[in-house]
Image (tube, rainbow, N blue to C red):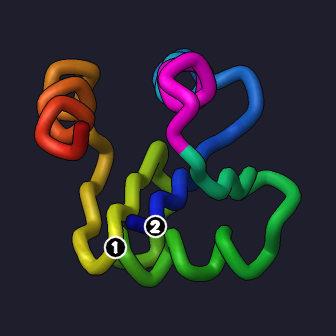
């Protein structure tokens, strides 16, 4: 399983999702769209030219701006 999280430093949902993944010891890759130009451009493609976050990638699935409830459901299904 490959998990990637796009977000932005200090953003509440981004911080919460990162903390959950770390505490659950789930390996993931984090990309901060404010400093990672490739992630920033990919985000713009996903959201029709707009920068929105967080974005969660689990294998081939893409979750656009998941809420906390959606994120928790996704994580429960993975474990």
> Is 63 on the left-hand or right-hand side of 42?
left
Q: Which residue is drawn at 46% across and 59% down?
A: 3
Q: Position of residue 26 (x, y in %)?
A: 51, 39
Give the SS element for disc 2: loop
* Residue 23 colored in magenta in the image: yes
Q: Which residue is drawn at 70% across and 57% down?
A: 31
Comparing 29 with 35, the one in front is: 29
Comparing 43 with 25, the one in front is: 25
Relative to residue 71, is residue 30 depicted above or below?
Answer: below
Distance Cα–Cα, label 1 vs label 2? 5 Å
Q: Position of residue 45 (x, y in %)?
A: 44, 83
Q: Position of residue 21 (x, y in %)?
A: 52, 31
| Magenta part of the chain | 18-26
Q: Residue at x 49, y 23 (%)?
A: 24
- Magenta segment, prevailing SS (helix, strand or loop): helix
The residue that mark 2 highlights is 2
Q: Where is residue 57 in the image (x, y as percent from the top left)?
A: 38, 63
Which of the 4 image quadrants contains residue 76? top left
Q: Do the residues labelled 1 and 2 touch (CB within 8 Å)?
A: yes
Give the SS element for disc 1: loop
Q: Earlier in the sequence, mark 1 or mark 2?
A: 2
Relative to residue 22, is residue 16 depicted above or below?
Answer: above
Which of the 4 image quadrants contains residue 22? top right
- The dot on residue 18 is none
* Residue 63 colored in magenta in the image: no
> Is 54 on the left-hand or right-hand side of 48?
right
- The dot on residue 59 is 1
10 Å neighbourhood of mark 2: few (<14), some, or many (≥20)? Answer: few
Q: For the view shown, which residue lies furthest in the right direction?
A: 35
Relative to residue 74, is residue 17 depicted above or below?
Answer: above
């Amino acid at each position: 399983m490959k998990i990637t999280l796009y977000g932005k430093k200090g953003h509440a949902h981004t911080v919460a999702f990162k903390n959950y993944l770390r505490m659950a010891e789930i390996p993931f890759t984090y990309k901060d769209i404010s400093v990672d130009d490739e992630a920033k451009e990919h985000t713009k493609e996903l959201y029709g030219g707009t920068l929105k976050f967080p974005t969660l990638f689990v294998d081939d699935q893409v979750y656009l701006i998941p809420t906390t409830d959606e994120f928790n459901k996704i994580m429960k299904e993975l474990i």
